[in-house]
Amino acid sequence: MDESVKTPEQQPRVRKPVRHMIWAVCLIALALMILGQILGNVLVGLCAGLLGITDPAWLFLLNYLSFIGIDLLVVLFVWLWEKPILRSFGLRLSGGGRGNTWAMFGLGLLVGFAMNALCIALAYLHGDLDFSMGAFRPVYLLAALLFVCVQSGAEELLCRGYMFGAMGQRYNVWVAAAANALFFGALHLFNPGVTVLSIVNVVLFGFALSIVMIKLDSLWFCIAVHTTWNFSQSIFFGLPNSGIVSEGSFLHLEAAADSVLYSTSFGVEGSITTTLVLLVLSLAVLLIARRKQA
């Protein structure tokens, strides 16, 4: 036997970086979020001051835009220390309807809006919601969609981009999926009007999009779903988005009642219908991925 050939037991073990352990990734993500929010607030505050923005509706939108600081810091951190993860951020064709493509981004926009609109429609038909028509301001709505994409993109780059990618280099992908989803849920624990079911739904939302990363390898799809989910709730229908009420929206909520289909404190995210549509999304992604592999 050639003594130069080592058995698997004799091969030197490659030490995995401590920074990929769950606790380390969570601490880094928390630091990126806090520092990024400070940076974003400074940048947006300076812009608002220079432009003299005083309209409450536009000032509300700037809260979404302030997440630009998190976007910038996450991309910078990943570029400097986690380059293998960076490939999941940009345009990338994986083949077979997977990867970051404009088609996947567009599909995600439709899916996010459709899921939220279905939840809201069921609550409306149940008699839990009453709306009035607001002014149609196309420039404001387009700006809102872009700014919400900045906010949703920040959370997805952080959780389904950096966190999922970093933990996935040390642990099984399903462990990475569960860990980043729980972290995502923890970020919403102190939102106004939070309930047990709403936090369960937020965690399920993060886990469903982690399944997208595992099976469809498309961070862009995750960003798009998250964008229109938030946009449709807050800006289009004028409902609380994770407990936060919009200052400007296309429709105005005139009255609301609590039920299993709607939470007056947290919106549709605190309803059983949201639980069901997220389970359906998860199952649909698993079935689609299975068909593509067949």
Image (cartoon, rainbow, N blue to C red):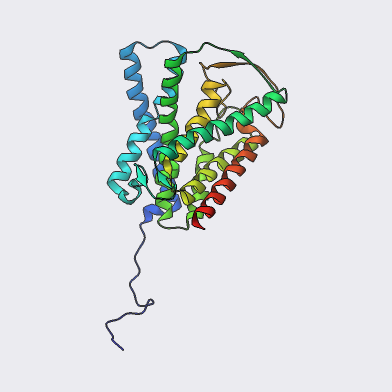
Q: Is residue 77 above or below residue 149?
A: below
Q: Position of residue 239 (x, y in %)?
A: 58, 22
Is residue 69 or residue 107 the one in the foreground?
107
Asked if residue 30 shows in the view, the reply is no
Q: Residue at x 72, y 22 (%)?
A: 127
Which residue reaches farthest bottom?
1
Q: Residue at x 50, y 26 (%)?
A: 231
Q: Is residue 132 above or below residue 92?
A: above
Q: Position of residue 227 (x, y in %)?
A: 47, 31
Q: Position of residue 68 (x, y in %)?
A: 36, 30
**Image quadrant where one finds the N terminus:** bottom left
Q: Position of residue 274 (x, y in %)?
A: 62, 36
Q: Residue at x 42, y 58 (%)?
A: 170
Quadrant of residue 51 within the rendered picture:
top left
Q: Residue at x 50, y 13 (%)?
A: 136
How many callouts does the rendering have? 0
- Residue 102 is left or right of residue 265, and the answer is left
Is residue 293 or residue 251 the one in the foreground?
293
Asked if residue 252 shows in the view, the reply is yes
